[in-house]
Amino acid sequence: MEPLSNKRKVLDFKPMTLAERAYLPAIVKGMAITIKHFFKKPVTIRYPEQKREFSENFRGMHSLKRDENGAERCTACGLCALSCPAEAITMIAAERQKGEEKLYREEKYAAVYEINMLRCIFCGLCEEACPKEAIYLDGDIVPSDMLRKDFIYGKDKLVEAPLNQ
Amino acid sequence: MELVEIGIKAGLVVIIFTISLVVAMYSTYAERKIAAFLQDRVGPNRAGPWGIFQPLADGGKMFLKEEIPTRANAFLFIVGPSLAIMTACIGSAVIPWGQKLTFGSTVIDLQVTDINVGILYIFGVVSLGVYGVMIGGWASNNKYSLLGAIRAASQNISYEISMGLSIIALLMITGTLSLREVAEGQHGFWSHGWFTWYAFKQPFGFVLFLICAFAETNRSPFDLPECETELVGGYHTEYSSMKLGFYLFAEYINMFISSAVMVTLYWGAYNYPGMDLLAAHIGTNLAVGLGVVLMFAKIFAFIFFFMWVRWTIPRFRYDQLMDLGWKGLIPLAIANIVLTGVWVTLYDKFFK
């Protein structure tokens, strides 16, 4: 049949030469390749001690932000939980009492704010949804742990450290 | 006097036994490290500096692991790994680790026993090794284990033939079966215008022996008995905890012993260039000690080679394995015998 293109490659199945049938030359060739790798620098990054450089827009662990006075920005509107495709975020809202103005910026705040880090897919939709600029995925890699329950991060792990203390 | 001699021998046995166990232990570590380096990784590095306590951690893990109960024949189930590790260990008895050390009137022979059929003894022990695999595989009461064991048995038997034949050509040169005399026959490095080491007199026989040694120790590319892709885990599918550890350990001891045998038979054992000169200048005992060190260096080089090959070459298919054994190596070994015979006759007739 006439070939449609000139890409067709004609293969011929020649019987193997003696060198090919003896295996050994090919084995020597392969071993030369592996020994070359023996003296190469390993590409491993020894993780907990060493870290790969992250890009500018790397999304790591979440942090709940404070405003310039050190009050928590989150107002427990629930938009982050609503936007979360993995349903990783839950929260319980509470009303701000008198004398708590230093602690919470808005009149309503999150008494409990939990992110299940096993569910989270680090898509960043929560930070896009947040109207108060309260949540950002600007942290590090979420560390490993032994138990599933320890991956549910509460406010103790998520809220930024107070400004001046 | 007699008692002193027995004491020395017993001490030697204990030392050699310990050395082979430690070497086997650290072979597991070396294997993982070498595998890592050949694949641009770093390997185990958490247990101690550079991970040098990894074998201890592995051993501890092995002892603490659960025994998985099977509907196995309990007695034979234990006999299998015990036999495997025992036959692996007793091979070291006839290997000459060095020349004689002399302290005053006491002469210490660095060889447990110099029986005059040393090579045959090694072969006998190696052939016994297959019983460990066979019994373990059968006692497991598992099809895959049994298939793995049968493969191991037929592979070992096939390659023992060509191994024996490749040795015959060597024996035609040495004229002795005693490993001590074989080692002494390679004294120094150069004499009568040629290397004394038998690897240079029998290069072809050495290559054949090397290939068969790979097959006998069930190392890649001949590790079909434990071929994971076809047989789950081969003969040690049903084994766990230290019984599995014994099988794995036996493989590494076998590797050590067969490296020692290859060094003794082909690579000059404890001999090295300029040994007489050194013995005359710094004393016999030091020269002998250096010989022992160099023997171990050669053995470790061979162990490295074993591992290097393992992480380079893929496994043979089973029919290819048998093809190579029966149609490749045996005819070549016989041809080697014939060529050696012709050469020895011509040499005796015309060049002497």
Image (tube, coloured by chain):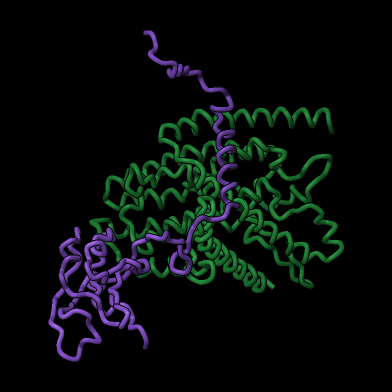
Chain colours: A purple, B green
Which quadrant of the rendered structure holds the C terminus of chain B?
A: top right
Indicate the quadrant where residue B115 lies: bottom right
| Total marks placed | 0
Instruction: Examine the rendering and report whether any part of residue B69 can be seen.
Output: no
Placement of B322 over or under B56, stated as above or below: above
Which residue corresponds to the image point at 36% horizontal and 46% vertical from the top-left? B228
Which residue corresponds to the image point at 52% horizontal and 22% vertical from the top-left? A16
* x and y, in percent, of residue B96 in the image: 66, 57
Lateral position of residue A34 relative to residue A96, left or right: right
Which residue corresponds to the image point at 57% horizontal and 42% vertical from the top-left? A33
The residue lying furthest to the bottom in this view is A99
Instruction: Examine the rendering and report whether any part of residue A19 can be seen.
Output: yes
* x and y, in percent, of residue B320 in the image: 44, 32
Lateral position of residue B339 relative to residue B253, left or right: right
* x and y, in percent, of residue A54 in the image: 43, 61
* x and y, in percent, of residue A120 in the image: 25, 63
Which residue corresponds to the image point at 69% horizontal and 73% vertical from the top-left? B1
Placement of B156 over or under B106, stated as above or below: above
Placement of A123 over or under B126, stated as above or below: below
Lateral position of residue A149 relative to residue B136, left or right: left
Comparing B116 with B294, the one in front is: B294
Comparing B191 with A96, the one in front is: A96
Comparing A70 with B314, the one in front is: A70
